[in-house]
Image (tube, rainbow, N blue to C red):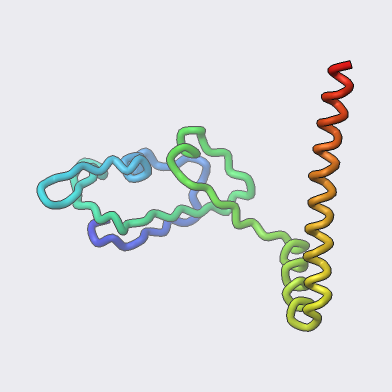
Amino acid sequence: MEMGTPVFIEDVEEELDPVLDPVLDKNVQAKGKGWQINFGNKNISYDWKFALFITTKLPRPRYSPETYAKVSIIDFTVTFQGLEAQLLARTVGIERKELEEKRKQLLKETNDCKNQILELEETLLAKLSST
């Protein structure tokens, strides 16, 4: 924290150590010309370039609502089917660009149609409820 270098903590379970609370809350106070944070039982200087990264191997961790409020949680879970689809899309994009453009166009049209269906359903429900 003093040097501003990132820290990486691996294989954390569903309970985080309470000693990390001041870091997660960013309880930083101005002291003189710099910044300090109370970590453990002592105040140490704090550099705003510092970053804390925490990883877990749990497929669906259940953290407390307080933890979710303090941190940004990113799910990097990759399935075989998802990876296969990404690789196929890149390969087709390189070898047959026109097919990839057609696929993108079809996906856009499909999404537009789904949105139109939702709008029509809402309109229909509104008309039925008003009659």
Residue under the point 45% across and 44% down: 71
Camera-side residue of 25 and 93: 93
Q: How many marks?
A: 0
Q: Quadrant for residue 6, please give it.
A: bottom left
**As drawn, which residue projects farthest toward the left?**
32
Name the quarter where the N terminus is drawn: bottom left
Residue 100 position (above or below residue 12): below
In this view, 91 is above or below 3? below
Pick the residue in front: 64 or 124. 124
Q: Position of residue 63 (x, y in %)?
A: 53, 38
In the image, what residue occupies the spot 76% across and 78% down?
91
Q: Residue furthest bottom?
A: 95
Measured along the vertical axis of the image, is residue 14 above or below residue 34? Answer: above
In the image: residue 110, left or right of residue 74: right
For image coordinates 85% across by 33% down, the residue present is 121
How far across and how far down the image is residue 109, in percent? 82, 56
The answer to whether 126 appears left or right of 69 in the picture is right
Q: Position of residue 37 (x, y in %)?
A: 23, 45
Between residue 31 and residue 15, name the one nearer to us.
31
From the top left corner, tell me how far across and down residue 43 is, in percent.
18, 45
What residue is rendered at 55% in x and 51% in y? 74
